[in-house]
Image (tube, rainbow, N blue to C red):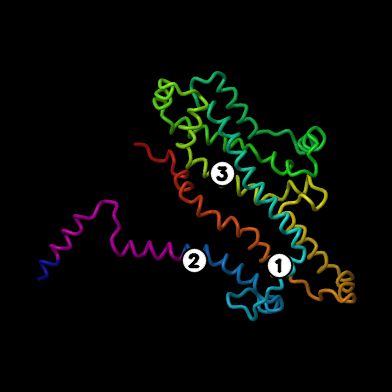
Amino acid sequence: MSEAISVRKQRIARKRGPNELTPTANLLVNVFFWIYTAACIMPLVLVIIVSFSDEKGVLIHGYNFIPEAWSLEAYKFMFKDWHQILRSFGISVFLATVGTAISLVMMSLYAYPISRSDFPHRSFFSFFMFFTMLFNGGLVPWYLVYTQLLDLKNTIAALMLPLLVSAFFVLLLRTFFANSIPMPLIEAAKIDGAGEVRIFGQIIIPLSLPVLASVGLFQVLNYWNDWFLSLVFISGSKNINLQFMMYKTMLDIQFLTSNVQASQGLSQAGGMLQLPTETVRMAMAVLGIGPIVFAYPFFQKYFKKGLTVGAIKG
């Protein structure tokens, strides 16, 4: 009996591939990744729970997954000026969608020609883009160009144009076009009578969806998380994006809570006796990352393909 069992184990071991894990090792790997996944998700869950917690309970007992009391005061405080919230949210969505679309078009149109070996002066234009990664014109000239030369101060265009083209992403797209698009395919299209515009639109772009989705996701994050451009170019509250609006709100709360006289003035006027500082911070985090978390599954398929493009040859 024991011999039959040992023979069966030997047969199973022979059938197992050289890179295949044993059942015990496979279980350990799964447990490790479950723990790692929980370690990544639990902070986000904690942020959401704290945003719905009572401020006094958070100040007394700290952050807990089971709060002492549930409350919507943080969200009520944030949505008091709901007109500004909706406007800033709309500006951020507009920048993240329209800005990313224009950015992908511009970077693709620059990257594709310099990826072609038959394009004249490709080395010059490649170095010209690479040079911008090493040196820039400085903050003051950059500001003067947008505010005085282009006259874009206090406009939404000032929040879009500075992030339209990234030298790193242009070189990434160039590398993809050069290494992953076969030249015989382009030559065959030319023989069939296709022009450069048709080749780019009907052949290159469909084959480049994985890398375009990856670059697009990073561009969406760049536009969505940016608050510096609103700080520099927008003087009022009409055209500020969501991130800068939340930044201003947090500064106002910190000022009121740290200024004793201002807090006493609010109390005497019958205003809010205790501003929800901690819960408001978490509510801002939820409001800021929520749309990106919901949008990521739509990019996930192409994003994973884009990360592995060019990693395996054959």
- Measuring from the top left, give residue 118's x and y in whole percent: 49, 19
Kind of element beneath mark 1: helix
- Amino acid on which the number 2 mark rests in the picture: Ala
Examine the structure image and report whether residue 14 is included in the region drawn in magenta: yes
Residue depicted at 20% across the width and 55% down the height: 15
- Amino acid on which the number 3 mark rests in the picture: Gly
* Distance in Å between CA atoms under marks 2 and 1: 25 Å
Residue depicted at 59% across the width and 26% down the height: 127
Nearer the observer: mark 2 or 1; the answer is 1
Q: Which residue is mark 1?
A: 280
- Measuring from the top left, give residue 122's x and y in whole percent: 55, 22
- Measuring from the top left, give residue 65's x and y in whole percent: 58, 75
* Distance in Å between CA atoms under marks 3 and 1: 30 Å
Residue depicted at 62% across the width and 27% down the height: 128
Overall secondary structure of the magenta section: helix
Q: Is residue 291 above or below residue 229?
A: below
For label 2, count other residues whose C-alpha is less than 10 Å away and answer few (under 14), some (14-19) or many (20+): few
Boundaries of the magenta span: 6-35
Which image quarter is the C terminus in? top left
- Which label belongs to residue 21? none
Nearer to the camera, 13 or 53: 53
Q: Are marks 3 and 1 in contact (CB under 8 Å)?
A: no
Drawn side of residue 144 relative to residue 133, left or right:
right
- Measuring from the top left, give residue 217's x and y in whole percent: 56, 47
- Amino acid on which the number 1 mark rests in the picture: Val
Nearer to the camera, 53 or 134: 53
Q: Which residue is mark 2?
A: 38
Q: Which residue is mark 3?
A: 216
Q: Which residue is outermost to the bottom?
A: 68
* Image-quadrant location for residue 20: bottom left
Nearer to the camera, 190 or 60: 190
Drawn side of residue 179 relative to residue 155, left or right:
left
